[in-house]
Image (cartoon, rainbow, N blue to C red):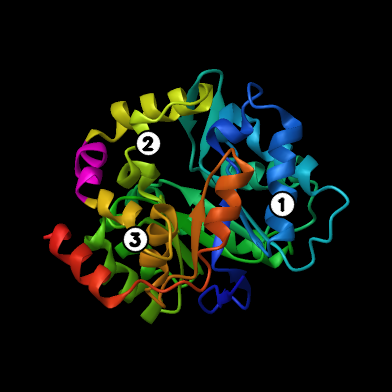
Amino acid sequence: MLYRPLGQSGSSVSEIGLGAASWWGKPQFPEAKAIGLVHAALDGGVTFFDTGSSYSAGQAEPRLGRALKGKDISKLVVATKAGTIADGGKVGRDFSPAAVVASAERSLRNLGLSELGLLQLHGPAIAELTDELRAALSGLKARGLVRALGVNSFDPAVIEHAIGLPELDAVMVDYNVLRPEREPLIERAAAAGKGVLAGMAMAMGHTGLKVASLRGPQDLWYAARGLIRHPREVREGARFKFLNHLAGMTGPQAALAYVLASRDVSCAVIGTTRLAHLAENLAASGMEIPTEVMARIRVQQR
């Protein structure tokens, strides 16, 4: 596993991180398997774990905490998110300073940590990034409860605004072969000293037409979510199915190598519920996209 600086935060992270979310955190997915994936990721050199207070209906954070219990976490950056709240089967929003501080404190208890490596605001609007909220975030840092601060948003305008906020150390954007338009934004963030996390780095498996490959309940769940929430990506992913027929790397490895070809990206975050997929993805660290393949990707991105 290779490692990269998380901007100017002072932390370094594995260039491939594990997302602890979605089906991974749900009770329907056996906890022993979920914890096994975290342990395998640790054995593979992963030092960045990304979760959220509202993920998996609020079940992801406590599960990740149980997975990390008893492990050496001194070199880890455990990231979570605040601002969204699991409320039964729905997700609510509260970016008030008091709510965000309470969420961070609750996340520390859920995760069994004394300090969060990174606290990200989860999909805020620009208007919600108030002076009062930023002061509250800085207060969490001053108390030693949070090492770094960031914003996770798939709205370019929000990320552009966040780049100019000195309190923030990192941004998470949706960057993959289907999102080349994020590259100038990523360059500006890195130039401003922000760590850049690539969410949806695998394009949700759509370059491999995962929605047509159903082998278990998690596949059905992910396929349904993709078809409902991301129909454009499902359609456009078919243009990149050639990535699954390359010599020397698999389609998922090629998708990750594309993201990591940008030195401005600190970490590509993946999610999986299968050990074989995890091993395959972690093996992408250090792989390089051949020049001719990158040229073909660029043609398809036009």
- The kind of residue tagged 1 is Ala
With 139 as the anchor, is 182 left or right in this view? Answer: left
Of the image marks 2 and 1, the number of the one nearer the N terminus = 1
Q: Is residue 223 highlighted in magenta? A: no
Q: Residue at x 56, y 18 (%)?
A: 88
Determine whether label 2 and label 1 are within 8 Å by CB.
no
Q: Dot 3: within a 10 Å radius of its alpha carbon, few (fewer than 14), some, or many (20 or more) residues? A: few
Q: Which residue is mark 2?
A: 210
Towards the viewer: 148 or 55: 55
Q: Residue at x 41, y 78 (%)?
A: 263
Would you identify the image quadrant in which residue 157 lies? bottom left
Q: CA distance from mark 1 to mark 3?
A: 26 Å
Residue 165 in the image: state x and y as whole percent: 41, 68
Q: Residue at x 38, y 58 (%)?
A: 255
Residue 287 in the image: state x and y as whole percent: 46, 71
Q: Which residue is mark 3?
A: 246
Q: Is residue 79 above or below residue 166?
A: above
Would you identify the image quadrant in which residue 62 lies? top right
Q: Is residue 238 highlighted in magenta? A: yes
Q: CA distance from mark 2 to mark 3?
A: 18 Å
Magenta residues, as a range? Answer: 232-239
Of the image marks 1 and 3, the number of the one nearer the N terminus = 1
Q: Which residue is mark 1?
A: 40
- Helix, strand or loop at label 3? It is loop
- The kind of residue tagged 2 is Lys
